[in-house]
Amino acid sequence: MRKLLSIALIVLAVGGFVWKRPPSRATLRERAQGSRRQVTRIQQRIRRRGGDAALSGKEAAEAFLRQAGVSYQLQHHPQVFTAQEIAEAEDVSGDRVAKVVMVQADELPVMLLLPASQRVDFNALPDILGARSVRLAKEEEFADLFPGSEIGAEPPFGHGNAVAVYVEQSLAEQSDTICAAGTHTDTVTLAYEDFARLVEPTVATFAQEDPIPAHLREVGRNQED
């Protein structure tokens, strides 16, 4: 049995795939319970250094990246409300623009990050997340995890790793990532390698191509649009 296991691991390694065990329910619960405390501590630390009583989501995102010593580029565009509209406004491929989708896995918050051109395959999520049930989160269930950010424009970092983050495999294969910077008019571009180092996400396959043209989609606030 041990020999068979070793052979299986070698096959996986040669194929370039590294399996990472999903967090247990206890781990997800612990992260959820500590998330708001960690967010508060991060915000307080940034405010002490910046001298601001309250930072906007954009200011907090930039301060977090500066503190981490990460190179990034800030972009400004007309107000839009979906990740695919961001791609169109900035004239880039939707494969490079990261869409944040917040879900509740057994009533615990989980962040999913996938290309703007794809949609979440909810049928695949229970097995991937190790949960009995997974549903799209309501705004009030995650809004306070991103203080200062506009709903639907939450940056996928700066939350202290308090929320489990899963990244779609195809997004992880991009050299850089474009994501919301706390507002519906700003995005930030950073190397995916830097993002992965900061957030330590789990990479998995949980998305599928979106067959619906962008102009026919109903605009949603939680980014599963």
Image (cartoon, rainbow, N blue to C red):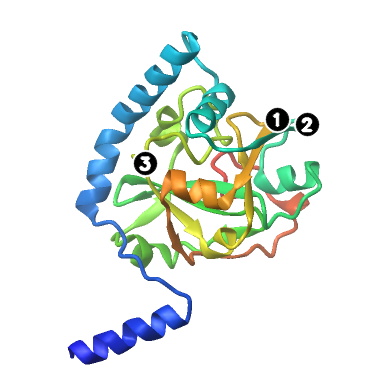
Residue 78: mark in rendering: 2
- For label 1, the residue is 185
Vertical relation: 205 (above or below) 8: above
Disc 1 or disc 3, which is closer to the eye? 3
Amino acid type at mark 2: Pro
Q: Quadrant of residue 170?
A: bottom right
Disc 1 and disc 2 in contact, CB within 8 angstroms: yes
Residue at figure coordinates x 41%, y 27% from the top left: 144
Which of these two is toward me, 74 or 88?
A: 74
Residue 57 image point, x, y percent: 54, 25
Residue 194 image point, x, y percent: 53, 47
Amino acid type at mark 1: Thr
Residue at figure coordinates x 45%, y 43% from the top left: 198
- For label 3, the residue is 161
Distance of mark 1 from mark 3, alpha carbons? 25 Å
Q: Is residue 149 left or right of residue 76?
A: left
Element at label 2: loop
Precedes in sequence: disc 1 or disc 2: 2
